[in-house]
Structures are given as structure tokens and as C-alpha cells.
Image (cartoon, rainbow, N blue to C red):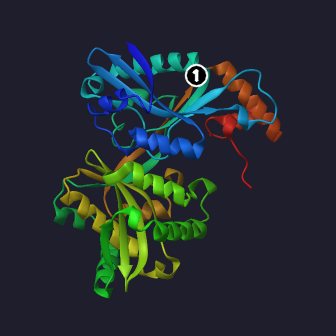
Amino acid sequence: MNVQVIDINNPLWLKILAQLRYDIYHLPEYLYLESKITRSIPEAILILDAEKIFFLPYLLRRCDDLFSEDLSTDFFDIASPYGYPGFLLNEAAAAAPEFLILAIDKLKEVLNSKQICSGFFRLHPILNQKNEQLKNNICKVHGMTVAVDLTLDCQQIWHQTRPSHRNKINRCQRSGFTAKMMPLSEYINEFQEIYKETMKRVGSRKFYSFNKEYFEDLANLLGNKLHLCVVEFNKQIACAGLFTECCGIVQYHLGGTKTSFLKDAPSKLMFNYVRFWAKERGNQVFHLGGGLGCSRDSLYYFKAGFSKKSYTFSTLRLIINEEKYRYLVNLRAKTLNIQAEELLKLDFFPAYRFQEKG
């Protein structure tokens, strides 16, 4: 096996992507943007074996800033950027189940040589769906996500819509609400205000409070792969959402609704508009995502009203260096004034990054 660690400026990154079906989360521009937010280093590991390809983008993070005391040596870990990145395989690799196991073993070997003690990866519900060989102690299933099968005809797509959703969509249209796609650059201020208002209303975590610079960078770096859908009523924006488009996959990224329009449910009109817009452009799937933490909550129920299609969402959790991992867990447990075994039972990975709420 040939293994290379490449950075976002290496032309090999895009050359490899050209041979694979990928999503927005695998682009070097997206990794760069995420690295700015998380103060990490964007990289990818490429593993080649004859005609087989394994490609994994990630963010390299230091661990020493997690603790007040000086660590005995350098510690690093890696994690996926926000969204559903996972790893990529070409057709030859996907057709050889044993290759993925060997690639993961080689991945751990390389990461260990880089002083990396753990790796946490959110797998892609669509692109990583058929990897049964990983469903063991390193792969955890979290729940389901919702997607619209755009290969169905328009009548079938509409028929899969929950009746209460159809009623709201029709009512919005009769009342004069209209949806359209626009460049984010023309509506950054308006979108940021709606998004901020929504996140405050739902009590979202600080991580999701993106600032204006993030949205400006998103528009500049993703270009025509990023689309803004706005729903207007009497020249007012009632709701808006960001959607990405890549290799036949349309993803819902971020969005929000003005509190004053909540009773009208304009977001139902927005998602309805986007799915038919995406189909008309020749895409195969519109992925709406799941509930908070991939639970079957009210958000999941809302999304499931647009389609009967669902996918499994899983994460890949790798402990690269058991000794270093345990050392950091012990330090975190000491900080929290609990036993290390208690911390390990919390189902948070990596355990040493667990933060108490409040």
C-alpha cells in the first residue's frame, strides 16, 4: 500500500477527488474554512493499493490546550469537519471489502507515527452506507437521517409528502409566499440575522453561532456549489436556507425562520421548492439530515414529512494509541473530579474532550 498525507494546497487532492464521487465536505476549500473555525490543520490521508483508492479528509487538532497543566509530550487527535464527510472509496476499493479493513489498519499505523492518539469521523449517510465490515466496536450507529430520492417522478415525490405538510405548502402558496434561489452574497446580512434569531430561539450550542465572516467565506470558497433559498411574503424574508450541491447530492446546510412567521411554516414551502429544484437540475438525492444528535425528535419528524427514504448515520471512533488516550482521559477525569471509568461510560468520544454543560 502506498500512503500519503497531503495538505489542502497539494494538487493531488483535487486530482483524487476527480476519480471519486464526493460531497462538499471533502473539498479542500471546505476543510480550510472549518480549520479557521476550529483552529486546526486541514489534511487528508490517501491510501492506494493497485487500482484501489481510500481517501479521508480531517482536521488535525492539538490536545495540550485542553488542560491547564503542561503535558509530558505532544498530543494530537483528528476529527471530521462539520457535516457528513466520512471516507471515500473508488469502485475498485468498494468491490473489495477486505481492502477497507486493511486501509483502516494502515491509517492507524500512520496516525500513530504522527503522535495522534485518536480519530473521530462522522460517516456520510449516503457515500458510506455500504460498509458492513466496519460495524463493530469502532463504528457506532447514532440514528437515521432523511433524504428525498430525486430519481422518483414528481408525482411520486409529492405523494410521499405527509398530508399535513402538503396542506401547509398549499396554504403558503395561496397566501402569497414565494420561494426562489439566490446567491448568498446578495443576502448575507439578512440570512445571518434570521439564522442568529433561530439559533437563539431554539437554544443552540455556541458552536453553531457562525458569524458573518463564516458566511462570507462560505460564499467565496464554495461558489456555485452553494445556494441560498429564500421564502418571501410581501417583500419580507420569512425563512431562508443554505443548500450545497455536489456530485448529484444536495445537502441542507443551515437555515432559519423568522419568529413572526413561524405559524405560517414557510420552511415547508422552502424544502418543497428545493427538492423539485434539485431534481430539475439532475441531482439524484436531496439529503435533509436528521434530528438533534440524530435522535427521532421533532426536527426529525419534520424532515421525515418530506420523504419515506432514510439512511443510517454512524461515526467511526479510533483509539490510535491506547496509552496516550488513557493518559488524557485520566487528566480530564481529574479535572472533572470523577473517576476515569465514569468518564469512559459517558459515550462521548474522545472522552478527554468531554465538557460539562453550563
> Position of 341 compared to 171: left or right?
right
Q: Front-most of 223 and 209?
A: 223
Q: Secondary structure at mark 1?
A: loop
> Position of 147 compared to 105: left or right?
left
Q: Residue at x 33, y 66 (%)?
A: 182
> Where is residue 196, by image quadrant?
bottom right
Q: Residues within 10 Å of mark 1 (few under 14, many from 20)?
A: many
Q: Quadrant of the C terminus?
A: bottom right
Query: Number of callouts in the render?
Result: 1
> Position of 165 compared to 197: left or right?
left
Q: Residue at x 38, y 40 (%)?
A: 27
Provide residue 296's location: percent of width, then percent of height.
Answer: 48, 56
Say which residue label 1 marks. Answer: 320
Q: Residue at x 19, y 60 (%)?
A: 280
Provide residue 203's location: percent of width, then percent of height.
Answer: 62, 64
Above/below status of 120 relative to 159: above
Q: Quadrant of the N terminus?
A: top left
Res 110 visible: yes
User: What amino acid is found at the position of numbered circle 1 in the picture?
Assistant: Ile
Res 296 visible: no
Provide residue 250's location: percent of width, then percent of height.
Answer: 31, 53
Provide residue 85's location: percent of width, then percent of height.
Answer: 42, 40
Q: Front-most of 232 and 149?
A: 232
Above/below status of 118 relative to 49: below
> Where is residue 119, by image quadrant?
top right
Q: Residue at x 28, y 80 (%)?
A: 170
